[in-house]
Structures are given as C-alpha cells and as structure tokens.
Image (tube, coloured by chain):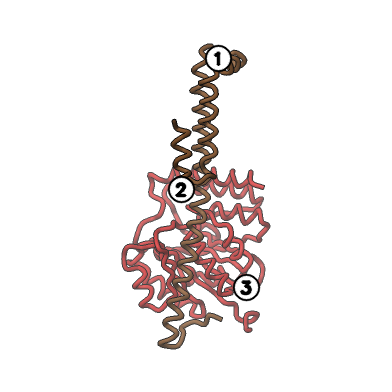
Amino acid sequence: MTQNTTPKILVIIPAFNEEETIASVITDVRTNVPEAVILVVNDGSRDSTAAIAESLGVVTLTHPYNLGFGATMQTGYKYARQFGFSVAVQVDGDGQHRADQIRRLIEPIIYGTAQITIGSRFLDGGDYKPSLARSAGMAIFSKVVSVILREKITDTTSGFRASGRDVIAYYCGHYPDDYPEVEALVLLHRKGFRIMEVPVKMSERGGGRSSITPTKSAFYMIKVLLAIFVDLLKK
Amino acid sequence: MLFGVVIDFIRRGLLKEKYSVLWLALCVAVMVLAVKRSILDTIALKLGVSYPPSLLFLVAFLFILLILLHFSVVISILHEKNKILAQEITMLRHIVKQGRDAGTSSAPESLE
C-alpha cells in the first residue's frame, strides 16, 4: 500500500438542490486538488444535482429521501471510512468554500499536527463581514465554544473542515442531525481530538440560499446552545 | 371498555405488547380507583384532594403524559434507526451500481 506516502483524500460535497453551483464546485476542486476523490452526497434533491454530478464523473451517493444536513455529511464520512480514506474534507455545494484553500486545511492533518481543522473566515485579517445579527450570533457561539474548549475558536459555524481517520470513524457513530457544525466541535473536544483553526478565504454564495434564513436564526441559536448544554450533561 | 379494546388490538396484531403495557396499567389503575371508592377516598384524603373524583382524572392525566413521553422516546429511536437504514441503502445502491458499471467498462475507482 502507498498510504503512508500519498494520503487518500476524499472531498465530500453535501448537496441539496444545488444544480446552479454544483458543476463549478466540482471543477474547482478537481483543478485545485487533482489527486482527491470527489464525492457528492445528494440528499434527495428534486432538481438535476445528481445528474450533473454523475455526468462529471464524480462518485455520487443519493439518499432515497431527504435526510437532513447532518445525516448527509455522515453518509459522506461513512463512505470515507468504508473505502479507507485518510483525510475527508467537507466542501459546501453552494460555491462558498474555495477549493484553492483546501490544501491549507489538509496539511496539518497529513503532518499529524491536528485531527480536525476548521477553515476560519476571521483569522489573519479575513475580510469577511457578516450582517450585524449574524455576527452577533457567531460571536456568542464563539464565546461559548471557546469557554468549553478552553481554546479560542473564531469561526464555529464554518462548515469548511478537514478530518483525519480517527475523527472520520467517530463521526460514523455520532454526528448531530441539524446544523451540526457547532455541536460537533464540542463533541470532538470531549473525545479529546486535537482541533485546529486555519485561516481561509471564502467566496460569497454562488447560488442557492443559506440553510439559515433570518427568521430561523433565533430558533437555530437556541437549539444549538441547548444541544451543546445537553452534550455537556451527557456521560 | 378501553381495556377490552387494547387487548383486542394486541390479539389482532395492531398493537405490540411492548407498547401496550402503559395503556393497560392506565386502565387497571383507573378501573380500580373508580370501582373501589374507599381506596380513592383514602388516597385523596392523604394527598389533601378535597374532591376525590378529581384524583381519578389526575391519575389518568399522569398516565397519559407518561405514555406520550414514552412515544417520543420510541419515535426518536425509530428516527435514528431509519436514518442508519437509509444511509445503508444509499451505500449499497452505490456499490451495486458500481459493480454493474464495472461489468461493462473498467471500474473508475478501485473498491479494494
């Protein structure tokens, strides 16, 4: 086996009705990380997302019905474990995550300095300027998570992350259902995984809309905070 | 009456024994309290309930709450199992498709 010299990299793209952007995301990843295997997990899209992905020749898994975002990512991680990938990168299907930043995420994992890396929009003079309400919400999450982890995490809601083998295996058994990013950090910390933030640049969304609409934001925040506190009570 | 319906449902396979226990317990408790007035009166007196028949409703209400909570737990477990099944189907479907494709052309990525 050549696994020690060349790590097997899997790029997981969760997609739910992303036909406008999926093709450009795939090409972007292919150009920047040609050695990676690209996996599109289609969460029961009703549009042509799966057909586009398949026509581009990437591995496409299609859920029989809409299972939700958390389950979609978990399907990707289950695939990564099944086929022995050593690094799994999560890249959103809406074009927000730039493939030219993927290497920065996977390097710490390949060199063993971290088991999971999170692409942060705020580190090192990132020029990301969210709306007032959103930045307030993000600041609260950042505070709460940083206190729990006893380590500063600036961008807790970022879904642009890479995971090593052990984290992949852990995710296969435990992955939060909805809006999993923040909660997953707390779970990983409790299991003692080494978490590291890496500065990345992100684009504006290419199409589609955020999974978090303004009206749902408050509900989202309460739900995630509740989930975090319940997690702290577990075990 | 409800007791009879529950038993009949179990007999006809509409209700699993596992999920009937709480219903039967509710029936028995309410029935005993309703028939044996003396028991109801003593408990009501001990708890300081001034109108004993209202205790009957309280008991029934608590049982119904318990049954609802039980159902929520069962639904959550089913939800999780259902998700795992769907993911498994997704993966199997992929592997089957890959096997079929490999028959006609060379496999695009090795299964190992």
**Chain at tag 3:** A
Crowd rating for badge 2 (residues with CA inside 10 Å; few <14, some 14–19, many 20+): few
Q: Name the residue under label 1.
A: B49
Q: Quadrant of residue A113?
A: bottom right
Chain A, colour shown:
red
Q: Which of B51 and A177 is in front in this view?
A: B51
Residue for badge 3: A110
Amino acid beneath label 3: Ile
Image quadrant where one finds the C terminus of chain B: bottom right
**Depth order, front residue of B48/B111:** B48
What residue sits right under mark 2 in the picture? Answer: B13
Assign a secondary structure to mark 2. Answer: loop
Tell me, by letter, which chain the rendering colours brown: B
In this rendering, the answer to whether A160 lies above or below B102 is above
Residue at the spot 41% in from the left edge and 66% down from the top edge: A42
Instruction: Say what secondary structure mark 3 lies in.
Output: helix
Query: Mark 1 vs mark 3: same chain?
Result: no
Q: Which of marks 1 and 2 is in front?
A: 2
In front of the other: label 3 or label 2? 2
Which is nearer the N-term, disc 1 or disc 2? 2
Residue occupying the far top of the picture: B50
